[in-house]
Image (cartoon, grey):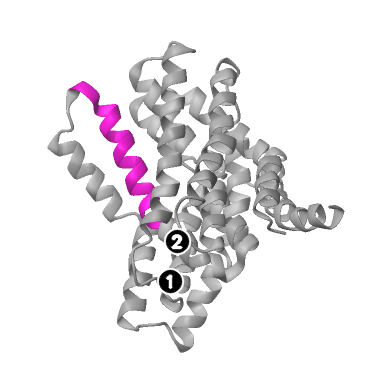
Amino acid sequence: MLSTLSDIAVIVLPVFGMVAVGYLAAKVKLVSERASDGLAEFVFSLAVPALIFKTLSESSLPEAQPWGYWISYFAGAFFAFGLAMLAARKLFGRSPQEAVIHGFAAGQANTVFVGVPLILKAYGPEGAVPLFLLIAIHLPVMLVAATVLMEGSAGFSRATAMKLVKALALNPILIGIYAGALGRVLGIQATGIPKQMVDLIAAAATPCALISLGLSLKRYGMSGGDLAPSALISGLKLLVHPAAVYALTLLFPMPAVWAGVAVLFAAMPSGINGYLLAQRYGIGVGASTSAVSMSTGLAVFTVALWLYVLGVG
């Protein structure tokens, strides 16, 4: 038992320790907000796409589409999404649009800044392909669903649809995924000096992503008036979502590593996209911001729990 807990700590503590380093660096003003913005942009636009491209272009992709894997994850995601919306309406008396923000925060995971570093540390290269195949459709599916619900009675206009398509088409993470998959299919890989450059950039993804998350947590903090909704969102995100996915992975045949990646992916804290969506519509900002901070803090313990359940460590 002690050995297992020690092994889990080796996975979890360095990851969240780096987040704490970023938070403290911002707290003592060692790093400015401007530098924080630049680091986040580097991670999202260059480092993580390079890591994804490198991994997918050098890995063996499954011949058949992993429908059971995707269904297990997204059924759990929308289960948490729906429960959060229901709670927002019935328990907290929030508007239909704000309920969507709560649902999105409960169903959408922090894939880039926590998911990639932690899952790769837990499963190594073997977990890379299932991880990035899930990332490939995670943002489009969740963002399209949330946007359609937010538009509500106003209808999903052509302008809104085009704006969404453009945002997804130009998303650096998705570009890295599609470029890597295409390179693998066509047998094209970076070699020589270009490969060394890609490797160097990709190596920066994990530490920079974690430091950047810590910097952002110091900036956004928590809103006192929305602690109860944020606590519920965090519980749904960290416990209910992965529990639902875990149950579904028992029904659909898939490799143990793929099932573990799906559960850990679901166990990640609420992502910053919930805050960005709330900012875009000018509603639910407090709850979404607090949910990011609260769920990230609690994830230190809940991720360790799920690693124990999965037998990783």
**SS label for mark 2:** helix
Q: Is residue 259 magenta?
A: no
Work out which residue is located at the far top of the displayed protein and give it. 93
State the predominant SS element of the stretch in magenta.
Answer: helix
Tell me the quarter of the picture where residue 158 sits.
top left
Q: Position of residue 274 (x, y in %)?
A: 44, 35
Q: Residue at label 1? A: 56
Q: Between 309 and 59, which is closer to the camera in this rendering?
A: 309
Q: Residue at label 2? A: 132
Q: Residue at x 38, y 61 (%)?
A: 66
Q: Is residue 29 shown to the viewer in this render?
A: no
Image check: 91 left or right of 139?
right
First in sequence: mark 2 or mark 1? 1
Tell me the quarter of the picture where residue 236 sits.
top right
Which amino acid is tagged 1? Leu
Judge whether 222 appears above or below 17 on screen: above
**SS label for mark 1:** helix
The stretch of residues the image draws in magenta is 135-153
Judge whether 133 appears above or below 88 on screen: below
Q: Residues within 10 Å of mark 1 (few under 14, many from 20)?
A: many
From mark 2 to mark 1, how far is it between C-alphas? 8 Å
Total numbered circles: 2
Image check: 95 left or right of 302?
left
Work out which residue is located at the far right of the displayed protein and give it. 2
Question: Do tag 2 and tag 1 residues touch (Cβ < 8 Å)?
Answer: yes
Which amino acid is tagged 2? Phe
Q: What mark, if any, has residue 188 been given in the picture? A: none
